[in-house]
Amino acid sequence: MKVELAVEPLGSWIDTNGKPLIIAGPCSAETEDQLVETARQLKDLGAVHVIRAGVWKPRTRPGSFEGMGEAALPWIQRAKAETGLPFAVEVATPEHIELALKYGVDILWIGARTTVNPFNVQEIADALRGVDVPVLIKNPVNPDLALWVGAFERIAGAGINKLGAIHRGFATGEASKYRNVPMWQMAIELKSIFPQLPIIGDPSHMAGKRAYLNELSQMAMDLNYDGLIVESHIDPDNAWSDAAQQLTPTAFGEMLDHLEIRQVESSNREFQTFMEQSRRNIDNVDRQLVEMLGARMALVERLAEYKRDNNVTLFQPDRWKEILETRTKMGQKLGLYPELVEEIYKIIHMESIRKQTEIIHSAPQNV
């Protein structure tokens, strides 16, 4: 059963003075001095609203640093006391929740490796019943929108209404310059399902390398995300986890200074008129696109009937290869990315195969 999300506005549980929410801090709480000093320097930037740090670190394989556990929680209390900033921590078990709340952690987040498992999410939801705490949920490791949506439904079903999404990118198995492919459309689809849900970009885990943090952070802002969660460490090169993707507080501040925060709308009348006309033009082009898709599918159906009547296979690799090559070249001449044209035609081709399969197994109408 679908649970409607009664989500409280972001501004009702964290005051950002109308600016994007900025969460920053080290990937892991390593030592008390490291955590407190990082928090102090981030506080001094005057732009950070929440400090973050990993206390329990789920790693792919045992033997690597997996966090300091409960020993780090008193350090968080000191960092909070010295900066006056709230603190966010990842939790993966009911025990984590109990300990985090015991030591005054203000915001909890569910990590990508936990979101992927509905059993774990439900255990967390059950542990949160009767608790009033903001919960942020990262997208699952793999691009599965249903798992992400289901996690929100489970946590909301436990009575949590201070909710937010963290978009940290996806492991797709495809070659990419990023550690996790952003797949921005996935977050946009989530927003279309839950329009009131705040979305926070996690450029650190998308990038995997600090060189890409600026471009990914700016893209999140351009897409009207509600904030960013970025890993920052006083000595990132010697960090015990995820060293390559962390920034010093100073470098992080410089990145924030260069971010361009755009308006959602403009009061300029000329702009509004131009937008209205442009949207009408786009609507007309889209109508033509849909009509042409319909015409193409009608041709495919007719072709499938001839294949059926002449006992010919519906998939012909040479023809498919020809279509991909010629259409991507056509697109390039029009300034379209080859990847865009290729993805569109893959979807069209799958629908073509589906339609042909239906027809090839049906009886001829003239029999």
Image (spheres, rainbow, N blue to C red):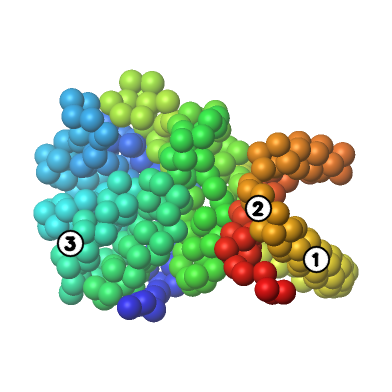
Tell me which residue sits at (28%, 26%) in the image.
240
Expressed as whole percent of the image width and height from the top left, the position of residue 320 reads: 70, 42
Height in image: 198 above or below 210?
A: below
| SS of the residue under disc 2 | loop
Cα gap from disc 1 to disc 2, whole angstroms? 24 Å
Give the camera-side residue of 164 and 349: 349
Mark 3 lies on a secondary structure that is helix
**In the displayed structure, does residue 251 sit left or right of residue 315?**
left
Give the labeled residue for mark 2: 311
Amino acid type for the residue under numbered disc 3: Glu
The image quadrant of residue 68 is: top left
- Is the C-beta separation of discs 1 and 2 under 8 Å? no
Q: Nearer the viewer, mark 1 or mark 2?
A: 2
Percent x, y of residue 151: 33, 63
Seen in the image, is 193 located left or right of residue 7?
Answer: right
In which quadrant of the rendered image does the C terminus lie? bottom right
Quadrant for residue 309, please give it: bottom right
Q: Which residue is mark 1?
A: 295
Q: Nearer the viewer, mark 3 or mark 1?
A: 1
Classify 10 Å Cα crowding around label 2: few (below 14), some (14-19), many (20 and above): few
**Image location (x, y in percent) of residue 61:** 23, 30
Q: CA distance from mark 3 to mark 1?
A: 50 Å
Query: What amino acid is at disc 1?
Result: Ala
Q: Name the residue carrying label 3.
A: 123
- The answer, for residue 279, to whether it is visible in the render is no
